Amino acid sequence: MKRTLLLILILFSSVLGLQAQNDLDDDDYPEQRPRYRRPRVHERYTIKSIRYGLFFIAGFAEGVNDVISFHYPAFKRVHPGANDLYWNPEVSWKNKYTNWDAGDNSSRYWQSTQVLVWTTDAFHMTNMVDHITMLSGASIMIPLNGQKRRWTWYAKEIFMSYMANRAGFYLSYNIFYKSKP
């Protein structure tokens, strides 16, 4: 309870601090108001850590996807109680249909074979997590304030994001789910 109250107090004080930061009215000194406020150092590192974290999650999801697709016994060794009807791609692809084995290939529910296919099995769910987090991480990199950056900044950010992605993949594919015991 104390931790929750402390967290709420910290969040509340940070919101108040952000609101009190610009205490001038727009009409007082319009020529002195900066068009863009450069983020402080801790804000820049927070944005970078969120970006790299999203790329890491994308790589981790890609690694899990590859493990369940190509090394399912290794996945089963780590998670012996996993439901094969959801996690095993050899069986779970039928989940999107009403009764595939009986010849009924109609959708099990609305959009289960189209937009909501990620809800039917682990293969499509890990693909969706990979794509959404990768897109979110890449969109954080785009400056929305019109600030121009050098091409070396973009090259460095792309390289670091790629390394975070590959670190997530390596952790899931080669460490958590080793294919050889």
Image (cartoon, rainbow, N blue to C red):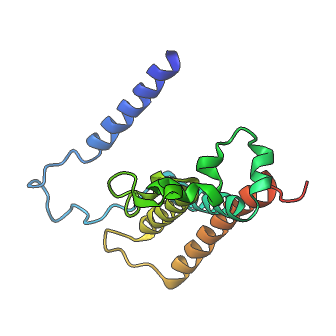
Residue 179 is situated, as x and y percent measured from the top left of the image, at 83, 59
**Observer-nearest residue: 137 or 142?**
137
Residue 72 is situated, as x and y percent measured from the top left of the image, at 74, 57
Above or below, 107 relative to 159: above
Residue 63 is situated, as x and y percent measured from the top left of the image, at 68, 61
In this rendering, position of residue 84 left or right of residue 139: right
Q: Quadrant of residue 73?
A: bottom right
Residue 56 is situated, as x and y percent measured from the top left of the image, at 61, 59
In this rendering, position of residue 139 left or right of residue 152: left
Residue with the most extreme left position: 27
Residue with the most extreme front position: 102
Above or below, 17 relative to 124: above
On the question of residue 54 being in view, the answer is no
**Observer-nearest residue: 3 or 108?**
108
In this rendering, position of residue 125 left or right of residue 145: right
In this rendering, position of residue 144 left or right of residue 44: left
